Image: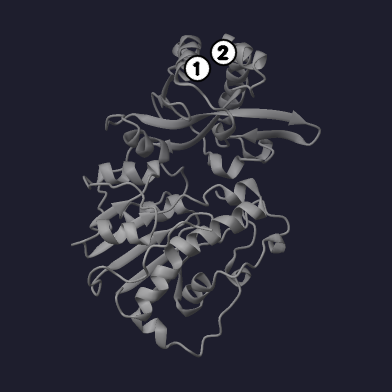
Amino acid sequence: MRESSPSLQPRFELMDKTLHLLIPGLLETGQFKPADSLPDIAAPALRWLLTRADAHPTPATTDETLFQLFNLPIPVAADLPVAAVTRLADGGELGSDWWLRADPVHLRPDWHGIFLADARVLAIEPAEAQALATAFNQTFAEDGLHLDALRPNRWYLRLTDHPGIRTHSLLSAIGRDINPLLPHGPSRNRWHPLLTEAQMLLHGHPVNRAREERNQPLINGLWLWGGGMAPIGAQSPAAGLYGNDPLLRGLARLANAAMASVPEHAGDWLDSADGESDSLVVLDTMRYDPADGDPSDWAEHVTELEYHWFRFCQRWLQTGKLAALHLYPGNGRVYTLTSAARWRFWRRIKPLSAFRTADRPHDP
């Protein structure tokens, strides 16, 4: 049992407040096989919100949705420039360089392909990241490449010009065979051998020999994705921005907007948002659930969000205390509700399975 329950009653008048709530992974199917293997848990408030809302299409991924909300263009035939933006959140300076995320990963070959595990399973120490980055830079300096390990789990590759490739996001590669997801484009024949050489360098480095002795998974690969230069013209979509997502924090820096940490529950947001007409909150609780493919984790996270967020939003809409809610659950839709939603009695409450997407890749 939970020790305490925050009150559902708002502590001040909310009449003019609008909440944009982004929850990547909430209604994606991802690696769940089959899609209907996800349990239809109760979640009455979430089902009420989805059923009573007006649904409209959004970009395919949460990252693209964030770019759209910050009034930035989404490239049609190029990567979304995630690397240059998240680098700002990790302490990098704004400039005109071309950046790729080059995130450290563990690659595991078997009879069916080469499968990727991300840095969550690696527990990389800062000293390990710096040692590997130094070895990379010494090896590839003549190729015009420089690797910055700004965070143990987020590394950045600086290029002299456009690399001539398109990439797939790290999230779309987790738990999958990487062979069909490798960089593609006019310069793929340059980058595939380079990545193989980098894997050999990392595999034989003293850092990984020490990890092997400690029975830790090896940091034996780099995943390139999110290439581009930092965009210009970002505009904050709300008076209040809340979240720990590095892309959100980087976009806020581009827009010269203040950021606050993600609230633990809706009551915390309520306290922080006093005086704000609208707020954007990004909750990362479920971001990796579709990639990891564990239905029990997904169900537990839905239950937590039901308790901490959805029931509050439902009550405040029903009582007219919240002017509008825009819910982005990661399925290519935004669900918009106003206080008028409480009068839509004719809409029969649907199970969560009615709102999930079919399995699709995260990237074009």
- Say few, some or many: other residues with alpha carbon within 10 Å of mark 1 (under 14 / 14 to 19 / 20 or more): some
Give the Cα separation between the discs numbered 2 and 1.
6 Å
Name the N-terminal-most of marks 2 and 1: 1
Give the image location of residue 132, x and y in percent.
50, 15
Give the image location of residue 240, x and y in percent.
26, 55
Q: Secondary structure at mark 2?
A: helix
| Amino acid, disc 1 | Glu
Q: Secondary structure at mark 1?
A: helix
| Residue pictured at 48% horizontal, 20% vertical | 129
| Amino acid, disc 2 | Val
Residue nearer the viewer, 86 or 95: 86
**Can you see residue 26?**
no
| Residue to which mark 1 is pinned | 128
Give the image location of residue 109, x and y in percent.
74, 29
- Residue 101 appears left or right of 177: left
- Residue 148 appears left or right of 14: right
| Quadrant of res 192 | top right
| Residue pictured at 61% horizontal, 35% vertical | 182
| Residue pictured at 52% horizontal, 39% vertical | 166
- Say few, some or many: other residues with alpha carbon within 10 Å of mark 2 (under 14 / 14 to 19 / 20 or more): some
**Can you see residue 159?**
yes
Query: Is 206 rendered above or below residue 94?
Result: above
| Residue to which mark 2 is pinned | 207
In this rendering, the count of numbered labels is 2
Q: Residue furthest right?
A: 111
Give the image location of residue 225, x and y in percent.
50, 36
- Residue 74 appears left or right of 102: left
Residue nearer the viewer, 205 or 159: 205
| Quadrant of res 159 | top left
Q: Are marks 2 and 1 in contact (CB under 8 Å)?
A: yes
